Amino acid sequence: MSRQVTLSPPTRGVAQPLFVAGDWDGFAGLAIDNLIQFLLILSICTAVLGFPVALVLGRILPAAALSIILGNLFYAWQAQKLSRLTGRHDVTALPYGINTVSLFAFLFLVMLPAKLAAEAEGATAEAASRLAWQLGVAACLISGAIELLGSFVAEHIRRHTPRAALLSTLAGIAISFIAIDFALKTFSSPLVAFLPFGVILATYFSRTRMPGRIPGGIWAVLLGTAAAWILSIFGDDSALVAPAEVLTGAGAVGLYLPVPVVGDLLEGLRHPLTLRYLIPVMVPMGIFNVLGSLQNIESAEAAGDRYATMPSLAVNGAGSMLAALFGSCFPTTIYIGHPGWKGLGARSGYSILNSIFFAVVALFGLTQLIAAVVPMEAGMAILLWIGIVITAQAFQTTDPRHAPAVALGLFPAIAAWGLLIFQQTLRGVGFALDDPGVAGLALEAAPALAASGLHLDGMVALSQGFMLVCMVWAAVSAHLIDRDFSKAALWALIGAVLAFFGFIHAGYLTPAGAMYDIAFASGWQWAVGYALCGLFFLVMASRIRARGADVYLDGEGRGHSRRSPEE
């Protein structure tokens, strides 16, 4: 946890400087994080969904940049306001960008199935791709609207949820979807990625300044890029860059102004396929975005910066809706990683720099060119470090007694990451996504997979609604550690309701990914399990109340009997 600086009362009313040296490090990390999302959008939308490059560069990315600009400027202003009110000059703006989980969910659970369904009904590849984009835009709008509405109740949820339950979810995402993923990429490209990784660890862990007072993050990107191009010059296959790609990227440079796409948005909203994916995908992702942003606000407070929940979430939702209006399929969110940026010394300026950077990148179509010049491996060490810091924060800033609850909360996110890897493996070894026989193939082979050690049914069940699953079990565990059995029973009841209607656990695997089975009693087996746990907790609570004064809690929350051992 970053050290909080308490300033004397006379400094109140004076905001911190808008730009400090640490903002450059923070900007390097946040910009690379968002840029990776841009590169993923460009590659997956064109290669998998068949979107024309002109659609991605001319509509989707400029629209996404609009929301990034709006959010980053607001959160920078919010940080300056908090600094002025408190007199503290160590306030870090909430990081903001495209939601990675929603990106993959909408790509593979909405747009790809829509494209395949349209082609199965006889639509041309071009028409099917356009329909997929329209449904993606509708999904983005719906997700933003849910987050906007959720901003009015989120603070109430936050007040009644243990910190361990909020932060353990982030830790699970950080260690799986961020840290492990980028660690694998780092060790698969040692000639390019190892040196940047070493630079990041040396400068960020030891707080040692690099020559020329240039931030370590920028040194890492420069050295990694230089290594890639040196390898390219000598004809090494692991170079990760190619001069021909630079020419292609340069050819795509132009002026791409955001344009409203109201007609396409309405087409997506009223298309019958939208209803098919509304409850299984769009609504859960909207709810998860609310919870994810809520958890990141809690993470910021744990690091010393307390922001108002309602306006923070409202701007987040409004940003996604604005992006949809101009053609983006991908919601934006308050980012994971606030303690990491704070640890780098970033304050408000890094957020402003990020908005300027993506305004330039999107408006001039520079995504392809940047991807060709700077390999992702040159900068991903920064994100790996962020994942490490977030995971550490979950243990450092919660009550030490609740560390087991945090650890338990890691499991669902790791299961979700494992399932994603499994799905990518199926696609990678050649299972055709448009083959109707593939849909049930994996689950039909579940017994054989279980015999080899992969319990696919359990992985699907644990990963479905993993953010909610994490919150429920981490909250139950935290209350049990405190011997508050009644509250543990309440959280078990919440789990039972969520499971009964399929918001957690109930689901099935398809060629495009795991799908929710949201319906009445769709997850009744898990609901019964939660209900039995809740009943047991109530029995324990009744037993504690019956013993009354014979039981007391010590300073560490452990229960003891006042009776003598002989009794």
Image (spheres, grey):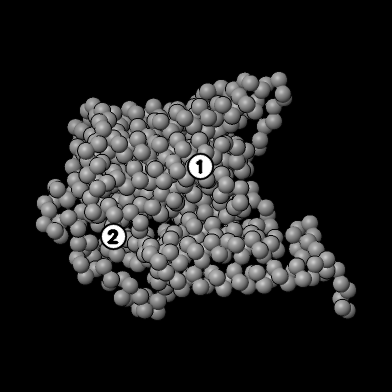
Q: Residue at x 47, y 45 (%)?
A: 150
Residue 152: numbered disc: 1
Q: Residue at x 57, y 47 (%)?
A: 156
- The N terminus lies in quadrant: top right
Q: Which residue is mark 2?
A: 512
Comparing 44 with 80, the one in front is 80
Q: Amino acid at mark 1?
A: Phe
Image coords of residue 409 (percent x, y): 54, 59
- The C terminus lies in quadrant: bottom right
Comparing 214 with 56, the one in front is 56
Residue 342: numbered disc: none
Q: Is residue 270 visible?
A: yes
Q: Is residue 360 left or right of residue 293?
A: left
Q: CA distance from mark 1 to mark 2?
A: 34 Å
Mark closest to the chain's N terminus, 1 or 2: 1
| Mark in the foreground, 1 or 2 | 1
Contact between labelled residues 2 and 1, with CB atoms less than 8 Å apart: no
